[in-house]
Amino acid sequence: MKRKLLASATLCALAYPIASSAQTSVTLYGVIDEGFDYTNNVGGHSNAQLASGFAQGSRWGLKGSEDLGGGNKAVFQLENGFDVNNGKLGQSGRMFGRQAYVGLSSATLGTLTIGRQYDSVVDYLAPLTANGNWAGYLLSHPLDNDNTDNSFRLNNAVKYTSNNYGGFTFGGLYGFSNQAGGFANNRAYSVGAQYVSGPLSAAATYMQINNPGANAGGSLAADDTAFLAGRERVWGAGINYAVADAATFGFVYTHTDLNDATGSVYVGNFANTASSLTFDNFELNFKYQFTKAIFAGAMYNYTLGKFDSAAGNSKPKWHQFGLMADYQLSPRTDAYIQGMYQHVAGGSAAASPLDQAYITGADAPSSTRNQFVGRVAVRHLF
């Protein structure tokens, strides 16, 4: 009798995870992007190097969901960034620096998540840019000033994402400062919307961060932010249109406005605090899918900058030309080549450190107003 009871208990114990697994899914995934970069001018010298994570940041992650019944699910995602060449963690050494959140999803109400997450610019507008879609890091706007290449993520963030309503989706995010007596100090909020109908895609977004990097526990830590400033605002809109499922044309405009800017992670501290620092980015992009395995893309971006400080004013103008060709070796592996050229016109080097060419992805600024980066790489998805 005891043996029969033991056998029944064992069968029940084995049956539970099998039934549970039918309602729960956990996926391990990742990207390894590794290649050779050549930069013609880095502080007056050329540079040849191996570099990781350009078309896509090298990463691995876990994501999953549990069916709670009634069209509701518990969801989570943990995503880590790393450098293939030395094995180091990305995002200033964070274990899950790319994304880390948990939340609830409803088939009728949308999804609410809490943790370290992408803002609305990344979610809705970036997919219409070259760098936020098919090209990646190298073809970013100068200094990735509008965060369309997700140079930073937001901590302590509560985020809502709607379901798809006839091609229309929308959402918003609020990042807490987590500071007693400083509720607005280093807080962030953003909203965005996207509409997709047949060959047409359009989006618009807005984001504001008060005192980014001001406190270590806030929405945007100093070691993670693209700029140090009293206030950072980004807004923009864009449109993509596909022709015959082969050619896609795109236009995106973004505006970045920083008050009392004291520095950038890309160019260090400014010699003089900028009472006003703005960027207006105008991007044209084009992608052509020759076959299922081969595509090529091109991007031209014009950025008008304005730097106002007590020491003087500067109005640099960036011209950027980017190209990419990609060949799919298998469903999970591709090889690609990229080239990016930047020329800076106007401005005044005495007033601003922004007048030397500096392509996002290069190790340091050029010693002149021109810089070129070429890349040959392989990417593997798992």
Image (cartoon, rainbow, N blue to C red):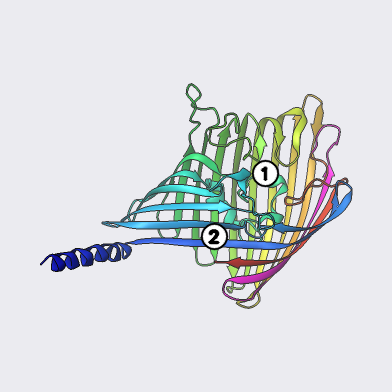
View extreme (left): residue: 1
Label 2, secondary structure: give it. strand
Q: For the point 25% across and 62% down, which residue is it?
A: 16
Label 1, secondary structure: give it. loop
Q: Which residues are magenta?
A: 327-353
Q: Quadrant of residue 272?
A: top right
Quickly name the residue at label 1.
145
Quadrant position of the N terminus in the picture = bottom left
View extreme (bottom): residue: 291
Q: Amino acid at mark 2?
A: Ser
Image location (x, y in percent) of residue 29: 51, 62
Q: Answer yes or no: is residue 126 visible.
A: yes
Image location (x, y in percent) of residue 348: 85, 36
Q: Answer yes or no: is residue 164 visible.
A: no
Q: Quadrant of residue 317?
A: top right
Q: Specify whether residue 345 is painted magenta.
A: yes
Whether residues under marks 2 and 1 lie with C-beta atoms below 8 angstroms apart, the answer is no
Depicted 76 relative to depicted 227: above or below? below
Pick the front one: 377 or 351: 377
| Sequence-first disc among 2 and 1 | 1
Depicted 111 relative to depicted 380: above or below? above
Number of the label disc, if any, that sits on residue 201: 2
Depicted 346 relative to depicted 22: above or below? above
Image location (x, y in percent) of residue 40: 85, 55
